[in-house]
Image (tube, grey):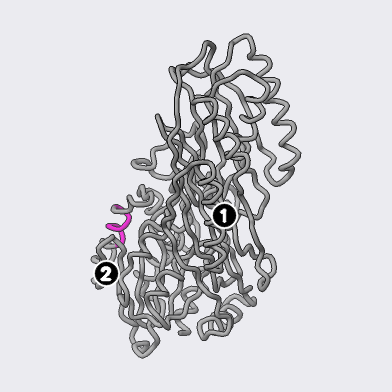
């Protein structure tokens, strides 16, 4: 880790990032990262407040001469998405992230990097301990459990913050200021399934892998494959052509990530193995061109597996395969107001078959509340027609863009003065905590920005090293101008 970060600037930001990367901090397991923040605040003699769910607010007085400046909050979340490539030996509950430097990019060894939002939190910590930034009164907000549904922000107490301006450091595109985001909702479905004794034959595992995956909001319009939909398509074809039985279907791991891998355990006579492999190879050759350069790594494979004792009833297996192949995934509408912005989408995220129950988890997003609800209702209706009981949870509001607000006007001017460029104003098809916390603090003005990070929520996540210095220079310079 030290070699990967050696001589990187700003040193104070990368020092805190290295410390956070060494701390396991999956969603709902941020206690050690939270303690790191509290320990730093204690050493600095700063006031720290922890709410009942574990969000932390640290207050730092203004530098001498800046006492009359407007109070601003710097905010980031402590948790990270924990995804790894199959075959990567890593325990997210105990192991540090193994950092790898590749030219101008920082990545992890087979896992997510945690730059989302570790680098934003690290920048806030660097400002917290700084002695050379001429800032006004500051509040530092470190939230928990952002990645599984903005839970920490949703439980954040009303009126806890004194700030007029709110700087979210969870941006992922250099040279831009984010001024709005989508709201989201989870639609989860469960259905009883029947099983029967496994027929004669051998066990096989049909696996879809090699896909890029990615963020279910930011990457939903990039044409990437969904491993669950592909698995459903493959199984439907196999069941039409071969007398196989299905014992298990599973895939996906996070509601806010496009599933990269999925698999099914099936039972088939050993003599028909060549037919099975031939059909799977033909399906891979058929689907690859459909994804093209959007997702060129697709692999559909067959490998030997332990023969299960029970398999799904044929009707339930056919129903699940057909549902995976047919349930909508992807964009539903583009914004009529902001060119290139996805307005509404749905993500088919996770599927599992337990002993007597199948579970399907999906996530809907939209910048417009009514569109979000309509998308969720559409998905729920299809699932209910297939006999599933549906529950909708984790809803959170969007953040309405205010391009003429004072904070946006000042941030644009500061960006030009500090970095010499006019920032692009963007809105994100993803959930940011701005909308949730802003709803609890009426009148607070907000922006979001950050360094350049790509392929978040996947093991391909990378941080552009050269974007961190201008990000931090803009952050500190903007605080000095407030």
Could you tell me which residue is drawn at 60 percent across and 50 percent down?
103
Span highlighted in magenta in the image: 32-37
Query: Residue 297 occupies which quadrant of the picture?
Result: top right
Query: Residue at 64% of width from left, 58% of height from top?
Result: 332
Label 2 element class: helix
Q: Is residue 45 above or below residue 28?
A: below
In the drawing, what numbered circle is on residue 241? none
Left or right of 194 in this view: 208: right
Q: Which mark is residue 378?
A: 1
Q: Is residue 229 above or below residue 175?
A: above
Q: Is residue 150 left or right of residue 339?
A: left
Q: Is residue 373 visible?
A: yes
Determine crowd level at label 2: few under 14, some 14-19, many 20+ residues with C-alpha closer than 10 A: few
In the rendered structure, the answer to whether residue 78 lies left or right of residue 397 reads left
Q: Residue 230 location, x and y as percent?
A: 63, 37
Question: Element type at marker 1?
Answer: helix
Give residue 44's mark. Answer: 2
Q: Nearer the viewer, residue 269 or 262?
A: 269
Q: Nearer the viewer, residue 151 or 411?
A: 151
Q: Earlier in the sequence, mark 2 or mark 1?
A: 2
Counting from the top left corner in percent of width and height, residue 354 is at 41, 32
Asked whether residue 209 appears in the rendered view, the answer is no
Is 36 magenta? The answer is yes
Give above or below for 459 relative to 331. Answer: above
Q: Residue at x 53, y 44 (%)?
A: 459
User: Residue 345: percent from the left, percent from the top?
Assistant: 59, 57
Residue 442: x %, y % from top left: 40, 81
Q: Residue at x 73, y 27 (%)?
A: 282
Distance, label 2 to label 1, CA atoms, is: 52 Å
Q: Is residue 232 a member of the stretch shown in magenta?
A: no
């Amino acid at each position: 880790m030290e070699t990967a970060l050696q001589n990187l600037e700003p040193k104070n930001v990368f020092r805190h990032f290295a410390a956070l990367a060494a701390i396991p901090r999956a969603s709902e397991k941020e206690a050690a990262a939270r303690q790191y923040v509290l320990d730093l605040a204690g050493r600095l003699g700063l006031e720290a407040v922890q709410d009942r769910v574990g969000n932390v607010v640290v207050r730092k007085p203004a530098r001498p001469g800046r006492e009359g400046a407007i109070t601003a909050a710097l905010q980031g979340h402590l948790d990270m998405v924990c995804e790894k490539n199959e075959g990567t030996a890593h325990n997210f509950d105990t192991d540090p992230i193994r950092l790898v430097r590749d030219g101008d990019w920082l990545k992890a060894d087979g896992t997510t990097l945690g730059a989302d939002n570790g680098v934003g939190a690290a920048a806030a910590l660097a400002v917290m301990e700084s002695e050379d930034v001429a800032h006004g009164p500051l509040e530092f907000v470190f939230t928990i459990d952002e990645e599984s549904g903005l839970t920490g922000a949703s439980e954040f107490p009303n009126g806890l913050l004194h700030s007029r301006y709110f700087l979210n450091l969870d941006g992922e595109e250099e040279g831009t200021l984010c001024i709005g985001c989508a709201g989201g909702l989870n639609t989860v479905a469960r259905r009883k399934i029947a099983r029967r004794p496994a027929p004669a034959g051998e066990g096989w595992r049909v696996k879809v892998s090699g896909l890029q995956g990615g963020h279910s909001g930011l990457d939903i319009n990039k044409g990437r494959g969904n491993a669950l939909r592909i698995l459903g398509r493959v199984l439907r074809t196999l069941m039409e052509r071969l007398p196989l039985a299905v014992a298990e279907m599973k895939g996906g791991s996070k509601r806010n990530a496009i599933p990269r891998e999925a698999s099914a355990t099936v039972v088939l006579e050993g003599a028909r193995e060549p037919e099975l492999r031939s059909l799977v190879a033909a399906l891979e050759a058929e689907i690859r061109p459909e994804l093209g350069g959007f997702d060129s790594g697709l692999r559909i494979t067959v490998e030997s597996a332990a023969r299960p004792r029970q398999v799904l009833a044929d009707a339930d297996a056919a129903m699940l395969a057909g549902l995976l192949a047919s349930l909508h995934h992807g964009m539903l509408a583009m914004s009529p107001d902001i060119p290139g912005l996805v307005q509404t989408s749905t993500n088919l995220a996770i599927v599992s078959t337990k002993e007597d129950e199948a579970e399907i988890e999906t996530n809907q997003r939209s910048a417009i509340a009514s569109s979000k609800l309509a998308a969720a209702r559409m998905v729920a209706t299809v699932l209910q027609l297939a006999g599933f009981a549906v529950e909708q949870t984790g809803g959170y509001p969007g953040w309405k863009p205010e391009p003429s607000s004072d904070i946006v006007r000042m941030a644009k001017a500061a960006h030009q003065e500090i970095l010499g460029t006019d920032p692009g104003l963007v809105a994100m098809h993803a959930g940011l905590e701005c909308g949730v916390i802003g709803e609890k603090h009426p009148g607070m003005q907000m922006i979001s920005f950050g360094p350049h990070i790509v392929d978040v929520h996947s093991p391909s996540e990378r941080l552009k090293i050269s974007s961190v210095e201008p990000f931090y220079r803009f952050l500190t310079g903007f605080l000095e101008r407030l």
